[in-house]
Image (cartoon, helix red, strand yellow):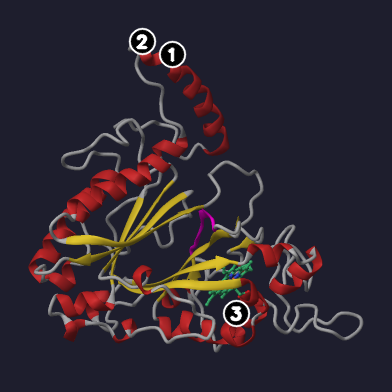
Amino acid sequence: RLLGTAAGAGAAGLVAGAAGGVAGHALASGDAPAPLTSLGAASVPFHGARQAGITTALQSHAHLVAFDLVAGARRKEAAALMRRWSAAAEAMTQGGAPDGDDLVAADAGPSSLTVTFGFGASFFDRTGLKSRRPDALAPLPSFSADALDADRSDGDLFVQIGADDALVAFHALRTLQRAADGTARVRWQMNGFNRAPGATARPMSMRNLMGQVDGTNNPKPSDADFEERVFVPAGGDPEWMAGGSYAVVRRIRMLLDAWDNLSGEQQDRVIGRRKSDGAPLSGGTETTPVDLGKQNPDGSLAVPGDAHVRVAAPSENGGAAMLRRSFSYHDGFDADGVPDAGLLFVAWQADPRRGFVPVQRKLDRGDGLSRFLRHETSALFAVPGGAKRGEYVGQRLLE
Ligand code: HEM
């Protein structure tokens, strides 16, 4: 696998890389390959106190996958699987080839590949580890707007794959599925996407399939309380989760036909931000803090009472917060032409009982946006801290 030298070169590197790609066509005659663009060459460390794929910048392609252990696979087999998966993920994320490589990504760089592993509540029953199951992994309560498909919810094991190249992402998925053979089987899989790096010159958050700028008011690593909101502290409960986080995964269908029937102004009021540039209706630009108390000249609230950003705000939910790191999905159109599209909502937090649960409870009771959404699947996973060199992910639980 080739590692170019343009990593971190930014927009200039991409332009240079594009030229290199053109030259690359002529290389079929056997010349040395052109250096990879910064996109292909970029790699995210696999080892560390935290798993990659939580605070990593969103990639353009994702596979979210749950596996169930097969009958007879218990703790020993699960540990061996985590060891195989970690070795394969380490190789692929660093631009190397996994054992028995199928060459699907052979001529690509790592393309910011991340692979993140987690455990669902049922994993602890199957492996005889019930006494070590975190309290925070208690099943999520049901919400009135839920229309959940049990077959595409939950699961023993979770794998989140993200990459800035579709073949690199598929290669990781297929490699891990093969490595699971005889131990675990795919329970469900969802494919997501986001904007490709370099596609926009505008420094703003992502847009989702409703067209909104999404992710603006996420907790930021520079916030003083970021760590405590997103990650389980050292000495946390249970200890094996130190440096880990809990992922809530919801496939949220957007009722796009109903949404498209709203005027632009109505759409802005549903969120409480301008769709055009993400600025709050209380004024300013995308990054201006929302002023929930601001009134219009007629005395009405600038950010409506049921606006999504008001109902979801930490200040309205006893400080509850989460890091939303979601991907869009589109699985075609139903027979009646309705888009099967929306958000693969992934929320990361130190404890879902102080993150997703209270916020979703509040949204469920009176959020303007919920009228245009349907939660179709749900899962909660304990995502342990990262592996040190020579360790596998989940070792502190499984050894
Ligand atoms: C903010 C869209 C579901 C929690 C926002 C914003 C948009 C948005 C456009 C404003 C920009 C930003 O700060 O990111 C959506 C869409 C959803 C969805 C399209 C479903 C398809 C949810 C769910 C939750 C949630 C299920 C949690 C249970 C939040 C929070 C904020 C937010 C906490 C930031 C509020 C603030 O502090 O200003 N969402 N959202 N969202 N959303 Fe959602």
> For the point 49% across and 74% down, which residue is it?
322
Task: Identify whether 390 is placed above or below 299.
Answer: above
> For the point 53% across and 44% down, which residue is it?
197
Name the residue tied to disc 2. Answer: 29
Type of residue at label 3?
Ala
Name the residue tied to disc 1. Answer: 26
Q: In the structure shown, which secondary structural element does the residue marked by tag 2 occupy?
A: helix
Label 2, residues with CA under 10 Å away: few <14, some 14-19, many ≥20:
few
Q: Is mark 3 within 8 Å of ligand 1?
A: yes
How many tags in the picture? 3
Mark positioned earlier in the residue sequence (3 or 1): 1
> In this image, 75 relative to 387: left or right?
left
Quadrant of the frame with the C terminus: bottom left
Predominant secondary structure in magenta? strand
Relative to the observer, which residue lies in front, 319 or 133? 133
> For the point 23% across and 82% down, which residue is it?
133
Cβ atoms under marks 1 and 2 closer than 8 Å: yes
Q: Is mark 1 within 8 Å of ligand 1?
A: no
Label 3, residues with CA under 10 Å away: few <14, some 14-19, many ≥20:
many
Marks 3 and 1 sit apart, C-alpha to C-alpha, by 53 Å
Quadrant observed for ligand 1 in the rendered image: bottom right
Q: Which residues are magenta?
A: 325-334
Cβ atoms under marks 2 and 3 closer than 8 Å: no
Marks 2 and 3 sit apart, C-alpha to C-alpha, by 58 Å
Quarter where residue 282 is shown: bottom right
Query: Where residue 241 sits: x, y (%)?
Result: 27, 75
Type of residue at label 1?
Ala
Marks 1 and 2 sit apart, C-alpha to C-alpha, by 7 Å
Find residue 312 and name its label.
3
Res. 246 in view: yes
